[in-house]
């Protein structure tokens, strides 16, 4: 398995289970009554393609929900959340952060 495939596998596992990293909702998402439904859509997201996943790492997605465009993004940091991970394919030195936001908050 290549490093990119490992990153994709780790990103998918984190996004689907919300376990093994941190999840952040922006103020616009947190204020919504349907935040649970939005999170479920992120967890089930599977519409990856060249436009939203050019590196094949499954680290970004976008969808329409109740008239709003929703973005989600996974970033890979070092364990202290101070800088980017030196090796996102290594979960021992990487903390994944999933951010869910309204597109206009980006």
Image: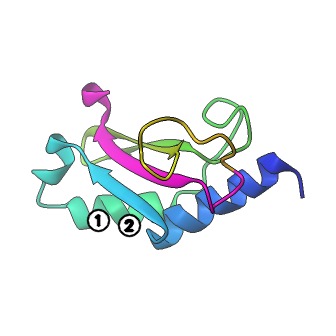
The quarter holding residue 46 reads bottom right
For the residue carrying disc 1, how many other residues have a C-alpha within 10 Å: few (<14), some (14-19), or many (20+)?
few
Disc 2 and disc 1 in contact, CB within 8 angstroms: yes
Question: Along the horizontal axis of the image, is 29 left or right of 84?
Answer: left
Q: Which mark is residue 40?
A: 2
Of helix, strand and loop, which one carries label 2? Answer: helix
In the image, residue 20 lies in the stretch drawn in magenta: no
- Give the extent of the magenta segment: 89-106
Where residue 69 appears, x then y in whole percent? 33, 37
Q: Which mark is residue 37?
A: 1
Where residue 26 appears, x then y in whole percent? 22, 43
Where is 105 relative to 68, above or below?
Answer: above
Q: Which of the pair 59/91 is nearer the observer?
A: 91
Indicate the quadrant containing the C terminus: top left, top right, bottom left or bottom right: top left
Question: Along the horizontal axis of the image, is 59 left or right of 33?
Answer: right
Q: Which of the pair 91/6 is nearer the observer?
A: 91
Where residue 45 appears, x then y in whole percent? 52, 57
Where is 28 relative to 94, above or below?
Answer: above
Of helix, strand and loop, which one carries label 1? Answer: helix
């Amino acid at each position: 398995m290549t490093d990119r495939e490992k990153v994709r596998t780790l990103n998918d596992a984190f996004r689907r289970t919300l376990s093994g990293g941190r999840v952040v909702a922006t103020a616009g998402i947190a204020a919504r009554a349907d935040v649970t439904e939005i999170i479920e859509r992120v967890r089930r997201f599977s519409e990856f393609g060249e436009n939203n996943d050019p590196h094949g790492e499954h680290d970004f997605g976008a969808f329409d929900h109740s008239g709003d465009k929703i973005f989600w993004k996974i970033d890979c940091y070092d364990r202290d959340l101070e800088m980017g991970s030196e090796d996102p394919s290594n979960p021992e030195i990487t903390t994944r952060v999933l951010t869910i936001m309204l597109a206009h908050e980006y």
